[in-house]
Amino acid sequence: MSTPTWVPRRRRGAELVLTVMAVGISVFGYIAVGLGVSGTIPSDTYTLIGGLVLAAIGAHLAVRQFAPYADPVLLPLVLCLNGLGLVMIHRLDLGRQALDPDRSAFAGSQVMWTFVGIVAFTAVLLIVRDHRRLQAFTYTFGLTAIVLLILPLLPVIGHEQNGARIWIHLGPFSFQPGEAAKICLAIFFAGYLVVKRDVLALAGKRLLGIDLPRGRDLGPILLGWLISVGILVFQRDLGSSLLFFGLFVVVLFVATERPGWLVVGSLLFAFGAWFGYVAFGHVRVRFDAWLDPFADPDRNMQIVSAMFGLAHGGIIGRGWGQGSPELTPFSFSDFILASLGEELGLTGLMAVLLIYGLIVERGLRIALTCRDGFGKLLAIGLTMSFAIQVFIVAGGVTRLIPLTGLTAPFLAQGGSSIVMNWAIIALLLRISDQTRRPAPPTSSVGSDEQTQVVKL
Amino acid sequence: MSELTLTLIKLGFLAVLWIFVLSAVSVIRTDIFGTRVPNRQVAKPAKKSAAPAQKSKPAKRRRGKRGQPSLLQIVDGPNSGQSVPLGDDPIILGRGTDAAIRLNDDYVSTRHARFASNGEQWFVEDLGSTNGTYIGSQRVTSPVPLSMGTQVRLGKTIVELRK
């Protein structure tokens, strides 16, 4: 008897074609930078092509081998972003060193970190063969996340940089534990809420058509809020604080299906924001720079410069190597979107944002089709942390919301960010592979005797 | 490097970038609409002529797509012979009052297993029963897709999906 079933398709060929296109875009960009800045095709182009092809093929083969049914578009999209980021960082190195030869170049280390990221990607695919295993370590991951968040505050290894205390230094390596904490917290929230969601979903008071949660169930959300305010107070990292709280509220909402959590979350957020504005000078500086950057153009030089850059780019941009994005401080990390906007214009920036949007869409699709609750919540958590981060960065750079110090995933310079984002993509692909894989053959009868209930 | 060449490179790069984005979108598109079930239309008439008597009655009640199961039938156990028509809502089997069929089986829990559909495929899911739900010798731990005629055992009761 033929039964209608969902036909699983691997579509690895489509993935390969898109991967080749993504690598092609990076190489094209690299050559264009060379032509735009110095008028020649850079001599090391072939080394770069070789390296990129090697990395892309490696990642593609890892997916082919360890997650054959995984989503076919995620990997090429991410590779394209990563390549664009590398090209932009390389271009900014050239520009910044033309201004002052003593400035350090970042492209080399970023290429190295990309390779580390792809190794981490392969390792996650290899080690986590079934994402449901992670549920067993729910509280381990929760504890790890808290330890990771506290690490930068410790006296010896913790390190303050540009006003935010989010770094640790271990010998020659520096690392942002917040990036790893993001993944650990997503796993913890998913594991915790998949168990507790029924309790939290119990209807409390109903007000204006919205089910508000009971007072005693507010514990977890208050805890999440306290963690986020703690980050704000002790680490002075506005972006991460917003990211963790947003992540928690969204996962809580998805798990319980109660809009009441969003209301409570927004109120707590509004209170936290007001508190931050009143109590901390650095928050007030950011707010004022957002509302009226030209009131104090010297102090708000960064955002003003980024806005001039975006305006300079216009609709189709200056072209690779033709603008002057290097004038903006941190144009290679926090403001890389503004740099891209100047060189590629609105057209290019929209394409980049669309790529981010597609990654988020695939993540939500994975969550929708996933069959187990933990996988659903994990995919939602990882995707939403990605989406919130992109929103905070893009909104900050374009002055939609106050500026906070988060990095654009895969684009911005920063080792820990790129490695951890590759790990997030690996986890998403793992869940996707589980979801799209054909069901194991179910033999109906024959071996029933082995499990027959026996009356004793 | 002339101004014109640089402009062409700039426009070319933006074009390639957008072609990449649009091809990614088209892959997603075929990914959504490309999961068509093969041979559903072709397989139907042949089967109808093969066993018309058996199928004629439930066929009237069925409002889902062709080739979909329309009946959850108990084939063995104390309630053998009883059946529930399949709709869009999930069906719970067990000894409790909210069960679609109250199974008179001592080895079945109050809320034993749930049968639910995502619109195309029926799944069985164990609701934390004491003695477990089995397909063959495999205990059901997560929702398992069911094909027609696959026998699912709850306690001493055996159920299957039928047309």
Image: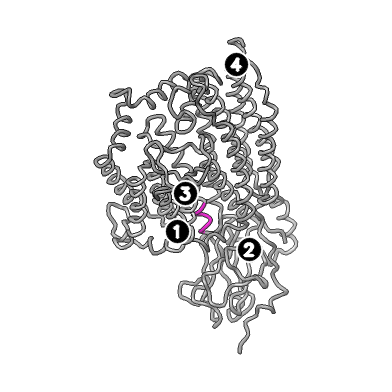
- Quarter of the image for the N terminus of chain A: give it: bottom right
- Residue of label 2: B146
Query: Closer to us: mark 2 or mark 4?
Result: 4
Measuring from the top left, give residue A207's x and y in whole percent. Answer: 27, 54
Provide the major secondary structure of the magenta segment.
helix
Q: Residue at x 48, y 36 (%)?
A: A408
Residue B16 in which image quadrant: top right
Picture colour scheme:
one colour
Amino acid of disc 2: Leu
SS at circle 3: helix
Which stretch is magenta?
A: A373-378
For label 2, count other residues whose C-alpha is less than 10 Å away and answer few (under 14), some (14-19) or many (20+): many
The foreground one among B32 and A59 is A59
Query: Closer to us: mark 3 or mark 2?
Result: 3
- Residue of label 1: A143
- Marks 3, 1 in one chain: yes
Calculate the distance from the C-alpha at mark 3 to the C-alpha at mark 1.
Answer: 12 Å
Do the CB atoms of the residues marked 2 and 1 lie less than 8 Å apart? Answer: no
Of label 3 and label 1, which has the lower sequence position? Answer: 1
